[in-house]
Image (cartoon, rainbow, N blue to C red):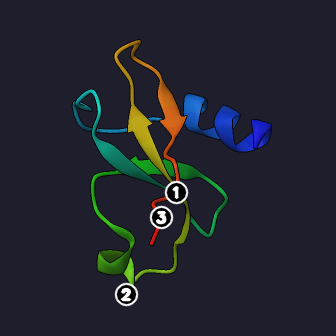
Amino acid sequence: MVKLSTIVAETKHQFEALVGNTYYLYRRTDGTHFISMVEPEYWSHINLTHLTDVVFTKNNTWKIAEKKKK
C-alpha cells in the first residue's frame, strides 16, 4: 500500500483535478504511470493496467479510494 501511495503522489496528470472526485491510476507497458478521468472499461482497446481508483483531496493530495461495497 505504501508503494502505491508513493506512485500516486508522484504521478502527473494533465487536467485540473476537482476535490472529492474519483480518478483512475494506470500503468503503461513501459512502466510509467498516469492518472486519468477515463474509467477502465473505456481503455479496453489499449494495453494498460488499472492499478486503483484515487480521490483528489482538499489538501491538494491524492488518496487511494475506498473500495465500494457491493
Q: Position of residue 6 (x, y in %)?
A: 69, 32
The answer to whether 56 is drawn above or below residue 47 in the figure is: above
Q: Which dot marks residue 69?
A: 3
* Separation of marks 3 and 1 at Cα, in angstroms: 6 Å
Residue 4 location, quadrant: top right
| Gap between marks 3 and 2 measured at Cα | 28 Å
Q: Quadrant of the C terminus?
A: bottom left
Local SS, label 3: loop
Secondary structure state at the residue bearing disc 2: loop
| Residue denoted by label 1 | 67
Q: Amino acid at mark 2?
A: His
The quarter of the picture where the N terminus appears is top right
Q: Describe residue 67's horizontal placement relative to residue 29 as left or right.
A: left
Tell me which amino acid carries mark 1.
Lys
Which sits in the foreground, 10 or 18? Answer: 18
User: Tag 1: Cα neighbours inside 10 Å, few (<14), some, or many (≥20)?
Assistant: few
Query: Residue 10: percent from the left, percent from the top?
Result: 59, 30
- The residue at the point 36 percent across, 49 percent down is 23
Look at the picture and state if 46 lies above or below 33.
below
**Eyeballing the image, is 30 above or below 25?**
below
Classify residue 19 by image quadrant: top left
Residue 16, percent across and down?
Answer: 22, 30
The answer to whether residue 14 is left or right of residue 52 is left
In terms of depth relative to the viewer, which is nearer, 41 or 30? 41
Name the amino acid type tagged 3.
Lys
Q: Which mark is residue 45?
A: 2
